[in-house]
């Protein structure tokens, strides 16, 4: 199986720096207004990471937004540089999340999978669970309870 | 709009509906010349359509409002300014970048260069602004034109608010200060400001002025909670866009995966068939891949997490290719299975981004994005103050190409994502979007309005059976109300007559665009995004773009002569001929606009957006020098 090669996107920052520090407490995230449904999740569908797969552990905390995801992008790219790898991201310390954070994490999953690997979130985070339920993303990606579960060790 | 004018407009709108319904009701019930149904029915349908459009216009104007000034922009907001470019000249983009950089509210400016031109990167570095282009992940994948360019940048930058400018749209220093205050209302997803062009002569031969739209119409839509996002000169809330992208992604994920798995099963079955003939030894691989796809389909039906289903499928197909080391698997089989896996993956490894916040299903991404933001419950604002000056098309060919793109995109949305069927919109919002989209169907009604008098004057077949006085008594009040409401609502807006002419005379463009939009939706035809030229390259050959209209004008003239001769010879009713000649005169007056458009050779006046700037000159020199400044530091 081959994966399409990707390199870092060509982006250069303005030389002028942001003169006003971001006041995070003022930036309230407005999620779409929709009813939250419970979703049937079958633990039997979890997928074990094959033996011999390279693993990389990362963690994010605090506010998961566009800035946090962009910061995470480089280590994820580094992890995938030498071929397929599974990146395990501990999100248990995430206490707030913006739609940009959710979208950015999903794009990192795409990035990892397009290179033959995967990116899995683990750790209990009420903010992430709420966000995923709100946009029904819990039907698409799972946030595992812990690292072992993310690896599927219980079943492997 | 002032209170007294609004009252007048509402009175006129009420009268228009009353007179209009009376006229069209009368037309349908007793005046259709059924013996000549092939022209009589299209005519009465066209008239009914025109009434509908007039009612929608009246409804829009009913709530036209001028917003009070927004609160001052709060300090400390993180704002990114995007300048989207593809093939525009370096100097034009540099001028916009310089003006954008110098806006007074603290922000970061990025040139989004879809042309991936090194000199643009050097120019950006010299001006101290950011530069974003597509990465290799876009190679060989759908690029989605400007929407893709903006989406790419959204995942490369971090500002909470995004100001979008087209390459030629030069902002005033106070642009951000004037509009950011609206975002104190946390339901506001975007603020749109007018688009005004500096290179339009007083007689506006190409009908570029959009003062009616960027005035009463946008104010009316705003009054109904449906201000339009028009792609440039607007500021958007990042999180609204991202929430929209996420919602659409998750809503479509299951259906898309089911479809993709069906397609994958079909492809692998085809592969099996081919292998049975040319490489039977490789059949077990295809059979195992097919079994894996069927298992994946079962898991989707069972409600398993989709990301796990596609991960498992990938692993299983991968395992199938490795499970038979004794089989010499043809390369094309591996490639086919790779492609199957890529296209099935729920997080869209077949695309450069998992989420597309800006709509990519149409070439008018702005309208579709705004409509879905409104459907999600976000609100919007139209700020009626010219804060940006840009370039209008400078020749008839470019103008027609631009209008064709707008119309095609709108009709794409009309056919594929009709506002009447989009969940979450209010009735008024649905009608505001519908009014804009259906306005492009005017091409068909114009064709009927041109054909009917010609048919009568040449053949004597009149599509209407009515006493002339009865006709006048019903038609004239309706017509007068339409025109009066148009004039009152648009008072102060330049180019009202030119706008009416263009709406009628560009009927071939509207018809072609409607057909293109339908073909794109129903037949899957590709619609290309034609970037509006900013260099006016087509000015010398304007006539070829308006051949249809010129031929029709000649035909109308000939028909008039023949009609007069027939009436003089007693072969046709004098009254009907006189009415039809007036009709012909109106048609000719409307079509005449193409003569001026075809003859127009471009604007020759001064450029108010080109201040002498040694910094700009220096940046251009550095940009075009081989050893210009390198890219500045990368983002983390």
Image: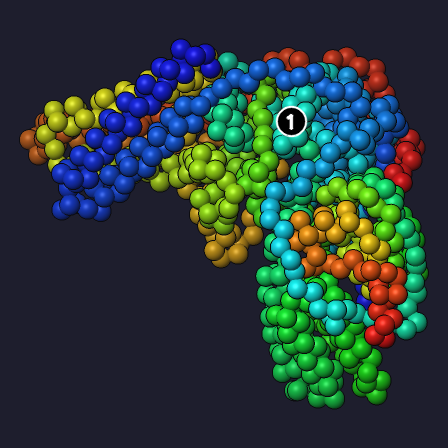
Q: Is residue B29 left or right of residue A84?
A: left
Residue A128 or residue B548, whichever sits in front:
A128
Residue B346 versus residue B230 in the image, above or below? below
Across and down, in percent, residue B615 comes to 84, 18
Residue B568 or residue B133, whichever sits in front:
B133
Chain of the residue that carries numbered disc 1 in the rendered image:
B
| Residue for badge 1 | B185
Residue A19 or residue B611, whichever sits in front:
A19
State the count of labels.
1
Taking the image as drawn, is residue A54 in sight?
yes
* Residue that appears at 63% across and 18% down: B70
Across and down, in percent, residue A104 comes to 77, 47
* Residue that appears at 78% across and 57% down: A143
Across and down, in percent, residue B423 comes to 51, 46
SS for dot 1? loop
* Residue that appears at 10% across and 30% down: B467
Quadrant of res A145 = bottom right
Quadrant of res B84 = top right
* Residue that appears at 65% across and 82% down: B272
């Amino acid at each position: 199986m081959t994966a399409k090669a990707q390199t870092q996107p060509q982006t250069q920052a303005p030389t002028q720096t942001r003169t006003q520090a971001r006041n995070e407490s003022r930036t309230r995230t407005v999620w779409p207004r929709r009813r939250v449904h419970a979703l049937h999740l079958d633990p039997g569908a979890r997928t074990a990471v094959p033996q011999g797969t390279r693993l990389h552990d990362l963690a994010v905390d605090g506010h998961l937004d566009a800035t946090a995801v962009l910061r995470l992008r480089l280590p994820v790219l580094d992890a995938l540089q030498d071929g397929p790898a599974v990146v395990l991201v501990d999100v248990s310390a995430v206490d707030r999340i913006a739609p940009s954070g959710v979208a950015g994490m999903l794009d990192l999953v795409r990035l990892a999978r397009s290179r033959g690997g995967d990116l899995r979130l683990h750790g209990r985070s009420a903010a992430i669970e709420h966000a995923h339920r709100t946009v029904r993303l819990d039907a698409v990606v799972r946030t595992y309870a812990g690292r072992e579960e993310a690896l599927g060790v219980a079943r492997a | 709009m002032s209170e007294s004018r609004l009252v007048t407009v509402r009175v006129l709108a009420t009268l228009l509906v009353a007179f209009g319904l009376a006229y069209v009701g009368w037309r349908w019930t007793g005046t259709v010349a059924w013996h000549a149904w092939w022209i009589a029915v299209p005519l009465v349908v066209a008239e009914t359509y025109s009434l509908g459009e007039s009612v929608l216009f009246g409804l829009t104007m009913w709530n036209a409002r001028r917003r009070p000034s927004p609160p001052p922009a709060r300090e400390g907001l993180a704002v990114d300014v995007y300048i989207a470019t593809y093939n525009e000249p370096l100097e034009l983009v540099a001028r916009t970048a310089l003006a954008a950089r110098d806006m007074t509210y603290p922000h970061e400016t990025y040139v989004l260069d879809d042309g991936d031109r090194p000199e643009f990167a050097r120019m950006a570095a010299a001006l101290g602004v950011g530069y974003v282009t597509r990465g290799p992940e876009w190679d060989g994948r759908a690029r989605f034109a400007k929407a893709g360019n903006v989406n790419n940048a959204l995942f490369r930058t971090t500002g909470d608010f995004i100001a979008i400018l087209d390459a030629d749209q030069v902002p005033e220093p106070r642009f951000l200060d004037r509009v950011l205050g609206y975002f104190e209302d946390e339901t506001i997803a975007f603020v749109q400001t007018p688009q005004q062009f500096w290179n339009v002569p007083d007689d506006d031969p190409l009908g570029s002025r959009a003062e009616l739209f960027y005035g009463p119409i946008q104010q009316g839509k705003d009054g109904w909670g449906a201000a339009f996002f028009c792609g440039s000169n607007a500021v958007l809330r990042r999180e609204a866009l991202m929430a929209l992208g996420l919602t659409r992604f998750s809503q479509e994920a299951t259906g898309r995966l089911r479809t993709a798995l069906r397609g994958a099963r079909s492809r692998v079955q085809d592969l099996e068939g081919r292998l049975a003939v040319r490489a039977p030894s490789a059949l077990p691989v295809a059979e195992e891949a097919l079994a894996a796809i069927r298992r994946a389909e079962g898991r989707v039906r069972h409600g398993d997490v989709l990301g796990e289903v596609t991960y498992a499928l990938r692993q299983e197909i991968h395992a199938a290719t490795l499970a038979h080391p004794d089989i010499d698997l043809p390369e094309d089989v591996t490639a086919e299975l790779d492609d199957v896996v890529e296209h099935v993956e729920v997080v869209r490894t077949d695309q450069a981004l998992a989420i597309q916040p800006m709509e990519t299903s149409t070439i008018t991404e702005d309208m579709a994005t705004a409509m879905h933001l409104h459907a999600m419950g976000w609100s919007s604002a139209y700020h009626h103050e010219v804060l940006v000056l840009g370039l209008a098309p400078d020749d008839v060919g470019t103008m027609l190409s631009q209008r064709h793109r707008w119309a095609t995109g709108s009709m794409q949305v009309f056919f594929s994502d009709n506002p009447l069927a989009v969940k979450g919109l209010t009735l008024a919002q649905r009608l505001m979007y519908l009014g804009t989209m259906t306005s492009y169907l005017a091409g068909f009604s114009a064709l009927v309005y041109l054909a009917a008098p010609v048919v009568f004057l040449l053949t004597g077949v009149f599509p209407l059976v009515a006493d002339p006085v009865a006709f006048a008594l019903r038609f004239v009040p309706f017509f007068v109300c339409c025109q009066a409401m148009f004039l009152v609502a648009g008072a102060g807006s330049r180019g009202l007559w030119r706008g009416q002419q263009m709406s009628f005379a560009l009927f071939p463009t509207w018809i072609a665009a409607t057909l293109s939009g339908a073909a794109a939706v129903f037949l899957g035809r590709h619609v290309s995004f034609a970037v509006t030229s900013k260099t006016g390259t087509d000015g010398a050959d304007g006539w070829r773009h308006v051949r249809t209209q010129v031929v029709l004008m000649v035909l109308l003239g000939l028909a008039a002569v023949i009609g007069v001769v027939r009436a003089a010879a007693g072969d046709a009713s004098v009254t009907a001929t006189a009415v039809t000649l007036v009709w012909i005169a109106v048609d000719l007056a409307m079509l005449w606009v193409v003569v001026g458009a075809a003859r127009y050779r471009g604007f020759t006046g001064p450029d108010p957006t080109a201040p002498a700037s040694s910094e700009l000159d220096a940046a251009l020199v550095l940009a075009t020098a081989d050893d210009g400044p390198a890219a500045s530091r990368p983002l983390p």
